Image: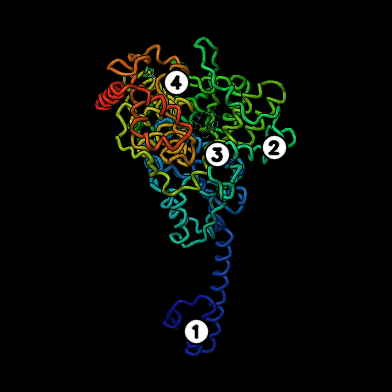
Amino acid sequence: MLEEENAGPVVGDQVSVAQLQGAGRRNAIELHAAARRILSIHRQVSLRYAMAQVRNLILVLGDQLTPTVSSLASGDPAQDRVLMAELDDEACYVRHHKKKLAFLFAAMRHFAEELRGRGWTVDYVKLDAPHPHASFTAALCDAVARHRPQRVRVTAAGEWRVAHMMADWSAQLRLPVDILADDRFLSSPAEFKAWAHGRKQLRMEYFYRDMRRRTGLLMDGEQPPGGQWNFDADNRKPANADLFMPRPRTHPPDAITEEVLALVAARYGEHFGALTPFWFAVTRVDAEAAFAAFVESALPRFGDYQDAMLDDQPFLYHAVIAQYLNCGLLDPLQVCRAVEAAWRAGRVPLNAAEGFIRQVIGWREYVRGIYWLKMPGYERSNHFEHHRPLPDFYWTADTAMHCVKTVVTQTRDEAYAHHIQRLMVTGNFALLAGIDPHALHEWYLSVYADAYEWVELPNTVGMSQFADGGLLASKPYAASGAYIKRMSNYCESCAYDVKQRCGPRACPFNALYWDFIARHRDSLARNPRMAQMLRTYDKFAPDERQRIAESAQAFLATL
Ligand SMILES: Cc1cc2nc3c(=O)[nH]c(=O)nc-3n(C[C@H](O)[C@H](O)[C@H](O)COP(=O)(O)OP(=O)(O)OC[C@H]3O[C@@H](n4cnc5c(N)ncnc54)[C@H](O)[C@@H]3O)c2cc1C
Ligand code: SF4
């Protein structure tokens, strides 16, 4: 009997008839009763397991720190589990600025706490956990093995590299993976594609007007206030050094952030940039306070001095909020509504409110549309066939060009430079010197706290380097030293003379500018907006053209 009882597992409805037949009748009845008891226990255990089983595993990425992001909005804290992970691959696919890494990890850790406060169960895998993960895929595989969820759910990735990874997850995990649209933007990639379809030129201005109409921002019925859509022409004043500059609100690190700062110092000490002083907001509440402080003290002059640059003023009247918007701590529509309200209340002039709103619902949305329209492949655009390596001084600031030195030093210290510093100093120099746009793209992507490929790449490749041949910009943003002198006080402290065109003491931007025009004459001649510059170059005497070429070559040889 014992043998028969031990003959094999007796589980489930499959108690074998042979076993019953082989046993005596009494034993057969006992065996059957035992089988039924075991079956009942098995069913209870299965039921309890099913009840405890996670329904959706919701992966939240580091730039999805919004409680209403689509993955979380569609979830249920009672049945779903959130996964967040600090990943070495993400910290190093380009070697991000230390301050940027600290900002993102600290914001992620605070966001996990915020979610727990809202009732979510969060698996948060720290970089210094006993078993950290290198990649999203590794983190997911591990969490799926632990929790055996029915599905994985995630909001669509911001950049193509991660979207490409996501496309494989369902097969790798052998689970359904729901990829939900990121509705934190005002225009989806599909809507942008529809807008772009059939247009000869994709000019931001027309896209922006559509966005104004669609959102109702700064609209009086069907018309813009005062009948004017764009006040850019009013927003190009140089700044006087004695203007009072409000600084962005600073936020001393708390214990969570201090822990992150120590981690980043230990693991990524070799990366570019200063880690401290660290003053970024890392929570939604603080980011909102920083934005409110901007509206109160800097926004009124944001428009007038949007393009100005001053030696010891890294921020001027800029908002310094792109890092908060891009990781989800601030909402683009909400900030624009607050700016419109400040204008309607008479607290800020129209050129400031319009200038700000244009950057957010115009440029920010437009560059994202271009990114998804043109990826993959856009990152390798190189219209002018520029292949010079990135000079070391983009990392060391070791250059006699005071404008470049100032912007790189500030970038190193703050992980921040404002738009005109990026476009007309470091970007302009790279364009004139023929730097490889891809190398420059990787530099911008790594050094700024707000840098994500979807926004950085079109700004670098399209706007700053004209590497897409004019898809994004109507003409190259190339300028000689005269522009930098007009918009800044950099030239006053420079070893070079901005008034000289050629020779060892001449501002390098000057000869490089005319040499750029000469080198790309054929290509630029097709652009009517460059005609004036080509005519000016053509009026130079042959020996002056020769001197320009020699000066440019002599300088480039020093890089
Ligand atoms: C070569 C180059 C690279 C850039 N890389 C990035 C980047 O990685 N991430 C990024 O957010 N911006 C990028 N920009 C755009 C712009 O320089 C930054 O958005 C801005 O400097 C951020 O500082 P701020 O918050 O003080 O902006 P403000 O000048 O106060 O403007 C307000 C907001 O408008 C938006 N905005 C302004 N200009 C642009 C623009 N051209 N494209 C998209 N949004 C804009 C930003 O969200 C910004 O926070 C780049 C520009 C250039 C020329
Ligand atoms: S002189 Fe030329 S290099 Fe020097 S700060 Fe002015 S623009 Fe820059």
Q: Earlier in the sequence, mark 4 or mark 1?
A: 1
Residue at 54% over, 60% down: 150
C-beta proximity under 8 Å, tags 2 and 1: no
Pointer 3 residue:
203
What residue is at 58 percent from the left and 36 percent from the top?
205
Task: Classify mark 2: residues with Cα within 10 Å, few (<14), some (14-19) or many (20+).
Answer: some
Find numbered disc 3 in the image and state the secondary structure of the residue it sits on: loop
Q: CA distance from mark 2 to mark 3?
A: 20 Å
Q: Earlier in the sequence, mark 3 or mark 1?
A: 1
> Between tags 2 and 4, which lies in front?
4
In the displayed structure, 266 sits above or below 314; it is: below
The reply to whether residue 103 is in sight is no
Q: CA separation, marks 2 and 4?
A: 36 Å
Expressed as whole percent of the image width and height from the top left, the position of residue 521 reads: 37, 34
Q: Tags 4 and 1 in contact by the CB under 8 Å rule?
A: no
Label 2 or label 3, whichever lies nearer to me, is 3
Where is mark 2, residue-wise?
216
The residue type indicated by label 4 comes to Tyr
